[in-house]
Image (tube, rainbow, N blue to C red):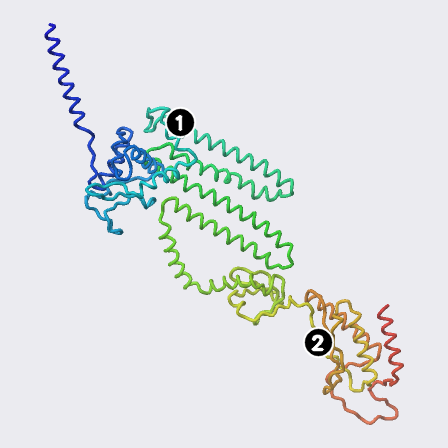
Amino acid sequence: MRRFLIFFSLIFWSFFSLAQEAAESDPLEYSLSTPYSTIYTHLSYLQDDNYHPDIAAKTFNPQFVDSKEAESLAIKLKQVLDGNAIFIDLDEVPHKANYTDSLTNKHRYYLTKKYPELYVEKEGDNWYFSKKAVRNISKWHDEVYPFGTDKLLELLPSLGTKKILGLYIWQMLGILILIFMAFVLHKLFTFLIEKLILQLLFKFGYKKLADEVVIPVAKPISFLVIFPLLILLVPVLQLPIAMSKYVILALRAIWPIFAIVFLYKMVDIICIYLGKLADKTESTLDDQLVPLLRKVLKTFVVIVGALFILDNLEFDITGLIAGLSIGGLAFALAAQDTIKNFFGSLLIFVDRPFQVGDWITSGNVDGTVEEVGFRSTRIRTFRNSVMYIPNGIITNQMIDNHGLRVYRRFNTNIALTYDTPPELIEVFVEGLKEIVKKHPETRKDYFEIHFNDMADSSLNIMFYIFFKVPSWSDELRARHEVLLEIVRLAEALGVNFAFPTQTLHVETFPEKKGNSPEYTNASSELKTKLEDYLKKSNN
């Protein structure tokens, strides 16, 4: 029995030794002969169920890095790919040992467009990760896992290795922590904005601004902070590549939406401030500019935000922008008049040839400016009709802006009958000058009142004065007042106004007088009448 046990032990030990030698002589197999085999070796030997970083490190050229550093770089590179949700489709990786890249005409294969320096290249008979990739892996790793989040990669897996629904316990725990953190931060930021900031706005009298703008912005502001944190921490969970890709894409696509909402509301805040500045200026054109600026800024925010969303969803917006450029050129050719009117509106806002409320004359249009838009200017004519003039046309025409006049001219001829004595004309002219000097809204430093012309049926006195009034209605009122004073002066002095007539002169009969009035030639008497008139007008 003893001999049997010894014999059985020798046979078992022999088999065990042979098995151990076979295991030692049969190491893990790998190949670096093609781009496919190199990338496959790196990825396959870093899986949870096949974790051999020493084999994955073989994909780095030993001329550039030693084995220990190569293991660290191999792990970091895998974490970079997982953290960015970059899926390497091995079916598309070439199996040819002499594969040549068509662009560089070198033995290279690029793994992803996101990292142009990440490629494998042929060295001798083997394919290795390039020297550029070796130099940049640590930098990429710090970008994906900044602020020490890479330390969590070592801590979290130690919390458990059991899987539930395809996820480790520590991954599920990490997801719950992120959700709880997002909830707490959202409540905290909302509280700070709605309580502290609103109280300050109420204190300084901006209740309308707080109710209409700040409260709707409170939630988007909190999400603007939360989503970047989630994007930063989700790669730490090392979720399955397909799940990680869609989660990160969703977070990156949703985050610009809150940015759009926030900036959209910020445009309202900016325009409210600009509107208050516009109210302080005398010009009314900037009052029209603020609403137009609001529309332009909001459109710009939406378009740029949409481009950011597409870019975060990994759409090639370069081709889209190029397509928009070509389409924009075609649109510009088809809409020349619209673009011309748009630039015409810009010229109006820059040069300010008129403003809202001005009375202008442009071509055959005469009226008051009511609104200046991006395409046309709306003018209310004196017939009370509304005319829309394209801005491209109005900027190319002569514009007579009556609203910018400091003085409004009044020029007329006062016609006296031919039988008016020279002395009476002289006194009448002096009286006219006194009327101008005494009126509160006439220009005192410049006016012209002279016996100016001997017409066919009258002696004409040029009456050339200026009114200092802001509007046409005020001008008409001032004219009314001056003309009434002229009539009163003529009545006081006994001056007759002429009108186009033909008079037939017949010899005067003894019993009948002529129709012409009898004038006095005494200058002293005429001056006395003028003085009496001026005293009455002063009273």
Marks 1 and 2: which is nearer the front?
1
Q: CA distance from mark 1 to mark 2?
A: 92 Å
Residue holding disc 1: 173
Type of residue at label 1?
Answer: Leu
Mark 2 Cα-neighbour bin, 10 Å: few <14, some 14–19, many ≥20: some
Residue 87, percent from left and from top: 30, 39
Query: Where does the image place residue 288, in percent across and percent down from the top left?
Result: 58, 57
Image coordinates of residue 415 in percent, x first then y, are 75, 81
Horizontal side of residue 457 vs 259, given as left or right: right
- Figure check: 6 above or below 330: above
SS at mark 2 in the image: strand
Which residue is at a point 56% across and 49% down the rendered structure image?
A: 270
Earlier along the polypeptide chain: callout 1 or callout 2? Answer: 1
Instruction: Please state the horizontal and vertical placement of residue 185, each as a whole percent of the image.
Output: 49, 33
| Side (left or right) of 455 relative to 235 | right
Q: Which residue is disc 2 drawn over?
A: 411
Q: Is residue 85 above or below residue 492?
A: above
Q: Secondary structure at mark 1?
A: helix
Quadrant of the snapshot with the C terminus: bottom right
Q: Quadrant of the N terminus?
A: top left
300 or 119, nearer to the observer: 119
Q: How many dots with numbers?
A: 2
Query: What amino acid does circle 2 point to?
Result: Asn
Q: Quadrant of residue 257?
A: top left
Q: Residue furthest bottom?
A: 507
- Residue situated in front as seen by the camera: 166 or 17: 17
Up/down of 111 relative to 520, above or below: above
Q: Nearer the viewer, residue 347 or 234?
A: 234
